[in-house]
Image (tube, rainbow, N blue to C red):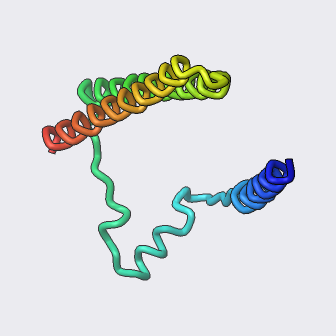
Amino acid sequence: MKKIFNFVKKTSLLLGVLFFLFLGISPVLAQSKDGDYGLAETVGEGQIQGAMKTKNVDSGAWGFVTSELGRIIGYALSFVGVIFLVLMIYGGILWMTAQGNEEQTKKAKTLIVDAVIGLVIVMSAYAITAFVGQALTE
């Protein structure tokens, strides 16, 4: 019982420290009249002229199609991420409630491994598609 209490105490202390380190710091939301937040002066001072240059996308029909396609792909990847999260939570709950039942533990492990493999396949497909799309548009 003492080991469990010490573990809970150390874990809550660690989580508290991490909470205040990462969430306790509020970011400063600076506003600028010209919209560049002082980046133009910084680039000019550092003589890094290429940092502020962006590639102009054709605003015609092709630009509209690519932007809409990118938005749809973003929504689809968000949905895949939500499905992954649900599968991981479900697998974790199955594993925690197995109570020594090896069949349920094996099912939970299989579900978690399959979810991770599916996520890796989807992210790899996205990376390959983004690479090929970038190569073709240049």
The image shows residue 43, relative to residue 23, as above or below, that is below
Label count reads: 0
Is residue 52 visible in this depiction of the protein?
yes
Estimate the x, y position of residue 10 in percent, counting from the top left: 78, 58
Image-based side of 19 in relation to 121, left or right: right
Query: Which residue is depicted at the point 41% across and 73% down?
Result: 43
| Quarter of the image where one finds residue 116 | top left
Q: Position of residue 31 (x, y in %)?
A: 66, 58
Q: Residue at x 43, y 24 (%)?
A: 110
In percent of the image, x 63 and y 22: which residue is there?
98
Q: Closest to the observer: 24 or 64?
A: 24
Q: Looking at the image, is 81 positioned above or below residue 42?
A: above
- Residue 85 at what x, y percent from top left? 55, 28
Which quadrant, please, contains the C terminus? Answer: top left
Residue 129 placement (x, y as % from top left): 23, 34
Is residue 135 found left or right of 117 in the rendered image? Answer: left
**Camera-side residue of 122 and 5:** 5
When asked about the image quadrant of residue 49, the answer is: bottom left
In the image, 24 versus 8, the foreground residue is: 8
Q: Is residue 79 visible?
A: no
Q: What residue is drawn where x is 54% and y is 69%? A: 38
Decide if residue 104 is on the left or right side of residue 2. Answer: left
- Judging depth in this view, the residue of 25 and 40 nearest the camera is 25
Q: Is residue 117 above or below residue 16?
A: above
Location of residue 6 by image quarter: bottom right
